[in-house]
Amino acid sequence: MKAIIIIIIFTLCLISGQVLCFKVFGCTGGSVMFKCMNSNQRKSYDQYKGRFFCRNRDCKTGISTEIQHRWVNNGRFNLYDDENSRFFTVFIRNLSREDDGEYTCGNKQKWSHDVTLVVNRNSSSCGTSVKKTAHIGQTLAFQCKYDHGFEKHTKVFYRVNVGPVHVLNSSQSSQSSEGKFILSDSQKDHFNVTIRDISTADGGVYLCGVKRDRSDKRPSETSNITFIKEIHLNVSSQISSVQVEAYISKSVFIKCKFPQKFKGNKKFIQKDPSQKIPVDEQNQWVLNDKVKMFDDTREGHLNIFISDLTAAGEATYRCGVNIPDDDDLFTEIKLKINQVDNFHGSSKSSAVVGESVKLTCSYPEKHNETKHICKENKKKICQNISSSEKQRFEFSDSAAGVFTVIISNVRLTDAGVYWCGAETRHKHLTSVSLTNKHQLTLTMPPVIRREGNSAEIKCPYDANHTNEIKHLCKGKCFTKNAQNIIQSDETHVKEPKISVKDDTELNLFTVTITDLRAEDAGKYWCAVKDAFNLPIELMIIMKYGITHEASVGGSVSISCKYIRKNNQTPSHQTEERVEIMKWLKKRFKTQILNQMLFIRQYSYPQTPLMGSCTLLSVSRSMKSLSVMLQSDSKMIFTVIMHLSITAE
């Protein structure tokens, strides 16, 4: 329907000071509203009976009524009769060329006026009728244009409720008393209308207009309004409808956004009309089966986390906010659960504190959205990395459907479970489909010292564990085979060569070992309760260093000494050789070892044991070689020899 732009021009027929006829001008697709005045100054009951506006005597085109104090309509024609006034009001909508012609308005008993209705389709102020959709709580703004010559006229804003109802005009304050409606006039070619805090009751049809008053040098009783735009406002409880894709056995995170006005209102999710799940607690995670919800009153968001997805979880959900005395406001979520076979399962990574670690993530190639990584909290909910920490996380695409995340300057608090995937953002909703799970464990950099010297094993811990007892163990603490070395609350010294210091300001637990021996080498673990176990490797350099010369591409033979227990069996020795080979191959990625390690056999009671290994294809990058010798499952010693590399 074309915009309702009305130009009304009254040509008044003045005879003996009385208005006997006038013209009304409108345009096709528009509407017009005017007043039919009583020409007799005396008031009587008959004067207010039988009001009419008709094209001919049978009034097939037009309207007539004896009803007062409310709008009466007959199709496009509307009439309002107020017995306390000397006029009644006529309102005609959706004018057409067929409406052009002569009409009569008046009282069936006493008086009447001739009215000429001219419908014009060439007016530049005729626009199109517009449809606007807004949701509850939103603010809506739009423009109403008018023709040249109306810059100084009063601008009006009406709402159609059976008939037109006045809302606001520019001659009053620029906004309604409650501040809901605001009208501002540019006095050039348009004025602006703003409707704030929209509710379902605000839906309907509105009219913009220009008032013709005494500025037209016409009697005040002939004042009329030219409407220039019609706005059909639809108020929706549904903010939007969004499809979210996720994957079987994986997780999905959804953030629903609401107007700030409702950030303190209670939120809910709904799977179908019979399953409305309220979020009773605010600013904390609430669990309902596999669905976890967090009503964030500071941001005005409802966060939803669903884990271990199955095909049965595919459904249409609503995340919404309760609004007293109004409809609930919600976003519709169409959750689609896909089966994808090319995602990696859970993976484990280890990182050295202070260094970097790389995590590899795969995602469906059709999703080109923002890459995302989050970390599980104690409640198994994956939460975003804080903005202060995010600068250490670097994203890069490595292949189609694959990206990597490099965490630099790894810290103690980085240990834990990470999920990565693709983030999709909409205006009122953000979703993250989580596809890869990574378990990140941490180790401290190895401590390397010479025989006879001292070594400090430093164990950092989180500030939350300041008042807890710290442990240092050889072997993983709190396990069956762990050897407890010392703990922070020990007041007496069991072993004179071992001392401990717990600096609660630096959150650092330090164990000092003096007079180092070969048997002191191995893997140690720092622990607080069962909150974390942090491994640290202690390597011992032979007191009397051995330097070997070798040329690049040549070979070198190294002999190592370690201590074995008297009850060691030949089978243990075989395990030792295998373990040494595994460790050397892991340490040197050039795969330079292609010969099994040979350890000479010594019979009891000889405790020193000599081991030798032949190293082929010496590389220039080899400045030293670490050899690990294992006497049994509890004793692991590491010694270091230096290589002097010469040219070929």
Image: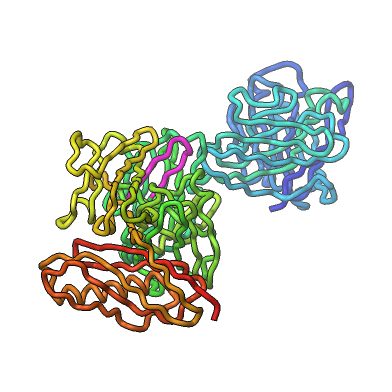
- Locate residue 258 relative to residue 228 in the image: left or right: left
Estimate the x, y position of residue 127 in percent, counting from the top left: 76, 48
The number of discs equals: 0
Q: Which colour scheme is used?
A: rainbow
Image location (x, y in percent) of residue 486? 22, 44
Residue 579's x, y, as percent? 27, 72
Q: Which residue lies furthest to the top in this view?
A: 42
Point out the image quarter for the C terminus: bottom right
Is residue 19 visible to the viewer in this orientation of the structure?
yes
Up-down relation of residue 217 to residue 334 (above or below): above
Please provide percent x and percent y for residue 375. 39, 52
Work out whether 57 lies above or below 332. above
Question: Is residue 538 depicted above or below 495 in this figure?
Answer: below
At 43% from the left and 36% from the top, the residue drawn is: 297
The quarter of the picture where residue 102 lies is top right
**Magenta part of the chain:** 291-304
Nearer-the-camera pick, 2 or 625:
625
Q: In this view, does 448 lie to the left or right of 609?
A: right
Which residue is depicted at the point 39% across and 69% down?
587
Residue at image position (10%, 68%) is 567
Between residue 454 and residue 237, name the one nearer to us: 454
Q: Which of 89 and 479 is in front in this view?
A: 479
Q: Residue lying farthest front?
A: 544
What is the magenta segment's predominant secondary structure? strand
**Residue at the image point whose x is 51% and y is 59% from the top:** 371
**Residue 337 visible in the current orientation:** no
Q: Is residue 218 highlighted in magenta?
A: no
